Image (cartoon, rainbow, N blue to C red):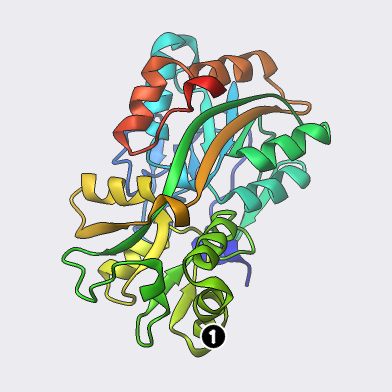
């Protein structure tokens, strides 16, 4: 069973003709990303057939964005603001919010991805992830026009009230503290978390959290996204997990019983998010417009609402 079949089992077929149905609403967007021109029969079975990371209609898309899943809650507002400036694109933007490593595999497969019984092939115009990955891809000629647009820091996510009294990264190594942690196989943030653990407690802390506790079941790795961490916390499967600060902010903004524990700067890691135009992009001009939009005051204000920060003035 692949990671995708754990995400969803889909028995619908699709062909690139005028849509006979519209995709179901992702559970966190409440339909905010749906185009005004939505057509067709809406089929949605919660937790079974809801395709939460595929947004829009790929068949007549004029802009296709592959973006790291930790920005899933920002995209509905960003797309709405962008299409307000470019009304001709309303209903013609398709985006995916899968983990960056999975999206890179999809790009390498010429845009094809299989989820359960469902296979989709769509070529991206834009890829957005961490700066380091983007620059590496640019050097290989896989991307162009790379733009840096936001930053983020790590934070420890715990249940409201912090019942286990977790105060630091060192506390994550305590026996009996159950953790949900990003899987290094496809989540780049796992590397930054590993570095922070080593800063806080050296190699023993890293080995405890990501080796010993994984073996004995006290650390559960994500199967798809690190947004599984708040789900596991709220269902009391785990006591804590390390995520981006923006994810703690988002969970609190929608009223979920989540709070954050700040990680000191000398133990923290800062992500720099960047985007670029994918080689052989079907719509390179519109892709460049989207990337320019990400640095505008309007887009930056949206990012700030969710706990992201702007690039330092010297980096812009």
| Picture coordinates of residue 240, whole percent (x, y) | 34, 69
Q: Give the vertical position of 283 relative to 75 (above or below).
A: above
* Residue that label 1 marks: 212
Q: Give the answer, above or below, for where 34 lies relative to 193.
A: above
Quadrant in which residue 15 is drawn: top right
Q: Horizontal placement of 278 versus 269: left or right? A: right
Q: Residue at x 67, y 19 (%)?
A: 283
Q: Is residue 214 above or below residue 49?
A: below
On screen, residue 130 versus residue 151, left or right, reads: right
Relative side of 188 to 106, left or right: left
Query: What residue is rendered at 65% in x and 55% in y?
Result: 114
Residue most toward the right? 140
Kind of element beneath mark 1: helix
**Does any portion of residue 9 appear in the rendered image?**
no
Q: Provide residue 187's location: percent of width, then percent of height.
A: 58, 57
Q: Is residue 29 visible?
A: yes
Q: Is residue 189 above or below residue 38?
A: below
């Amino acid at each position: 069973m692949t990671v995708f079949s754990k995400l969803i089992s889909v028995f619908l077929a699709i062909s690139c003709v005028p849509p006979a149905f519209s995709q179901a609403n992702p559970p966190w967007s409440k339909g905010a990303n749906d185009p005004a021109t939505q057509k067709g029969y809406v089929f949605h079975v919660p937790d079974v057939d809801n395709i939460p990371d595929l947004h829009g209609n790929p068949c007549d898309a004029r802009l296709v964005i592959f973006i790291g899943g930790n920005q899933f809650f920002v995209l509905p507002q960003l797309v709405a603001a962008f299409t307000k400036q470019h009304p001709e694109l309303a209903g013609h933007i398709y985006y995916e919010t899968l983990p960056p490593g999975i999206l890179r595999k999809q790009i390498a497969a010429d845009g094809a991805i299989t989820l359960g019984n469902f296979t989709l092939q769509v070529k991206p115009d834009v890829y957005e992830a961490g700066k380091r990955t983007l620059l590496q891809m640019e050097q290989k000629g896989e991307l162009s026009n790379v733009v840096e647009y936001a930053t983020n820091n790590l934070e420890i996510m715990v249940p409201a009230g912090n019942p286990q009294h977790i105060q630091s990264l060192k506390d994550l190594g305590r026996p009996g503290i159950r953790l949900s942690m990003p899987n290094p196989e496809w989540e780049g943030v796992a590397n930054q978390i590993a570095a922070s653990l080593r800063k806080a407690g050296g190699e023993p802390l890293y080995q405890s959290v990501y080796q010993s506790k994984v073996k004995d079941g006290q650390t559960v790795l994500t199967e798809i996204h690190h947004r599984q961490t708040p789900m596991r916390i709220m269902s009391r499967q785990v006591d804590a997990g390390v995520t981006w600060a923006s994810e703690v902010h988002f969970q609190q903004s929608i009223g979920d019983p989540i709070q954050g524990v700040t990680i000191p700067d000398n133990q923290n890691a800062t992500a720099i998010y960047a985007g670029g135009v994918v080689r052989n992009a079907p719509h390179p001009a519109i892709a460049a417009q989207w990337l320019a939009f990400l640095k505008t005051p309007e887009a930056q204000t949206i990012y700030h609402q969710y706990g992201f920060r702007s690039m330092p003035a010297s980096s812009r």
